[in-house]
């Protein structure tokens, strides 16, 4: 009966009507977490960037493309008890998407002026209707736990689930994560993403006992 918001997948930021800036996120881990929370009886809104994943049973899915759309969909899903931000949100977007396809001119390629996207995790963490438990992910290539600890404070969330994307590149089926909170670090052995999701959902449920 608890309400949960889960973000998943990449975002896609338009350059022009046919081109986007995006990343390699598959959405697998976020979709698995949405499924696991629903299996435990949560009312889940899954805000998904462009991915090829089936909608888990019992989950309300909202499809979005850009970071700004993802933030708006999350805010529309408030109030909630739990937010799990798994999406690989594009940090930047082109300042002005061209209205028409950009054509080659024979000169130098066009420069793309970037601006920063809103931070969905930080915004939900600071929201007046902040969910009681806000969880972020940290995909790092080095010094995984140190950067993740820093993100806890920077983003204002309760837990950070850190993983090493060198050991487990985007798109794979397994993850070795550490769950970091103010009360310490919980390191889990490498396991399928579906199992990471079930363990995380169980840990979330414990905090609401
Ligand atoms: N996140 C978000 N909105 C953004 C960027 C990130 O909600 N615009 C969330 C992700 O869903 C994840 C967490 O923030 O839960 C970590 O994101 P990450 O991009 O790794 O952190 P950054 O603060 O961007 O740090 P850096 O790029 O320096 O690693």
Image (cartoon, rainbow, N blue to C red):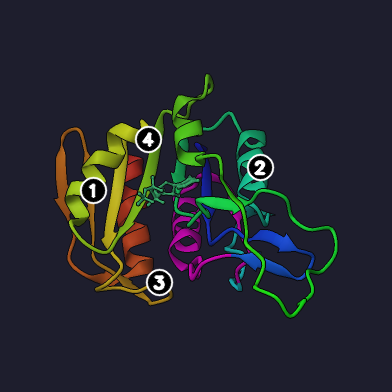
Residue 15 x/y as whole percent: 70, 61
Residue on which disc 1 sits: 147
Q: Within 8 Å of ligand 1, the CB of disc 1?
A: yes
Q: Position of residue 74 (x, y in %)?
A: 60, 40
- Count residues near mark 2 (Cα–Cα under 10 Å), then give few for <14, some for 14-19, many for 20+: many
The dot on residue 73 is: 2
Q: Earlier in the sequence, mark 1 or mark 4?
A: 1
Q: Looking at the image, is 58 positioned above or below residue 106?
A: above
Please determine whether, in this image, residue 96 is positioned above or below residue 119: below
Mark 1 or 2, closer to the camera: 1
Q: Which residue is mark 4?
A: 155
Q: Is residue 52 left or right of residue 151?
A: right
Find out if the beta carbon at label 3 lies less than 8 Å from the nearest ligand 1 atom: no
Whether the residue carrying mark 4 lies under 8 Å from ligand 1 is answered with yes
Q: Which residues fall within the magenta stretch?
A: 22-51
**Residue 159: x %, y % from top left:** 30, 40
In three-dimensional space, the C-alpha distance between marks 1 and 3, rounded to whole angstroms, equals 18 Å
Q: Residue furthest bottom?
A: 106
* N-terminal label among 4 and 3: 4
In this rendering, which labeled residue sits more in front, label 3 or label 2?
A: 3
Q: How far across and how far down the image is residue 147, in percent?
A: 23, 48
Q: CA distance from mark 3 to mark 2?
A: 24 Å
Classify residue 6 as left or right of residue 167.
right
The nearer-to-camera label among 1 and 3 is 1
Identity of the residue drawn at 37% across and 59% down: 197
For label 4, the crowd category at 10 Å Cα-Cα, with few meaning under 14, some 14 to 19 and many 20 or more, is: many
Label 4 with label 3: CB-CB less than 8 Å: no
């Amino acid at each position: 009966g608890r309400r949960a918001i889960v973000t998943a997948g990449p975002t896609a930021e338009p350059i022009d009507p046919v081109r986007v800036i995006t990343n390699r996120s598959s959405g697998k881990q976020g979709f698995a977490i949405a499924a696991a929370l629903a299996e435990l009886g949560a009312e889940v809104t899954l805000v998904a960037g462009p991915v090829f994943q089936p909608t888990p049973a019992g989950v309300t899915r909202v499809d979005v493309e850009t970071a700004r759309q993802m933030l708006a969909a999350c805010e529309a899903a408030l109030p909630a008890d739990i937010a799990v931000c798994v999406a690989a949100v594009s940090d930047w977007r082109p300042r002005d998407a061209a209205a028409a396809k950009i054509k080659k001119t024979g000169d130098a390629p066009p420069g793309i002026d970037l601006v920063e996207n809103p931070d969905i995790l930080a915004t939900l963490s600071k929201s007046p209707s902040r969910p009681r438990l806000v969880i972020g992910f940290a995909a790092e290539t080095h010094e995984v736990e140190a950067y993740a600890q820093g993100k806890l404070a920077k983003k204002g969330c309760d837990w950070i689930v850190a993983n090493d994307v060198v050991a487990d590149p985007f798109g794979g089926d397994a993850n070795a994560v550490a769950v970091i909170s103010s009360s310490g670090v919980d390191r889990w052995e490498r396991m399928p993403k579906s199992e990471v999701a079930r363990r995380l959902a169980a840990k979330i449920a414990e905090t609401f006992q």
